[in-house]
Image (cartoon, grey):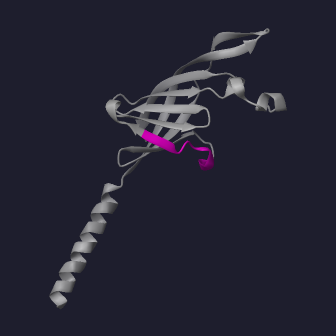
Amino acid sequence: MLKQLIILLSIFISIGSTNVAMAVETKYLCISEVSGGLRYSGGAWRGTTFKTDSKYLMVMNSGVLKSVNVFGAPDDLAMQYCIALEPTMSFVCTNNFDMFRFQPSTKRFVMSKTSGYTSEFEEAGVNLPANSFTPNITIGKCEAR
């Protein structure tokens, strides 16, 4: 009986170890290369480009995208609603009006911010960076850290 208990315990320990070993968290630093969008200026909306200083921290767990956040921002602001897009083997994360899409095979990302055009912050006088109130798209690449 003792021998059977030891064998059973060994099996449970090895199964638990396998599950822990399989859950691998990888963090990526995503750096923008090009950014452009729309800006309201002189009474009209116009196309414009933006500085490409945006950085994002992306967290994958066992090859599945779990969250994306502006680099250095508090964790509670991270996009955590992420899904896999099966036909393209890519991932997308969203929050409110914004979307981050990542393609693992190329390490490329697209971040689209559509919240600016419909934002209530501007009317409230909240001082945010110039591209916060304008719809924009940013593209770049991610590298494991």
Instruction: Tell me if 133 is positioned left or right of 1 in this view.
Output: right
State which quadrant residue 36 falls in: top right
108 w.r.t. 81: above or below: above
Query: Relative to the observer, which residue lies in front, 29 or 136?
Result: 136
Q: Position of residue 141 (x, y in %)?
A: 44, 28
Q: Position of residue 127 (x, y in %)?
A: 79, 31
State which quadrant residue 99 falls in: top right
User: In which quadrant of the rendered image does the C terminus lie?
Assistant: top left
Instruction: Tell me if 35 is positioned left or right of 29 in this view.
Output: right
Q: Position of residue 53 (x, y in %)?
A: 59, 26
Q: From where the camera sits, is residue 119 visible? A: yes
In reply to whether residue 81 is colored magenta, the answer given is: yes
Residue range of the region highlighted in magenta in the rendering = 75-83
75 w.r.t. 119: above or below: below
Q: At x 50% / y 38%, what residue is drawn?
A: 93
91 w.r.t. 38: above or below: below
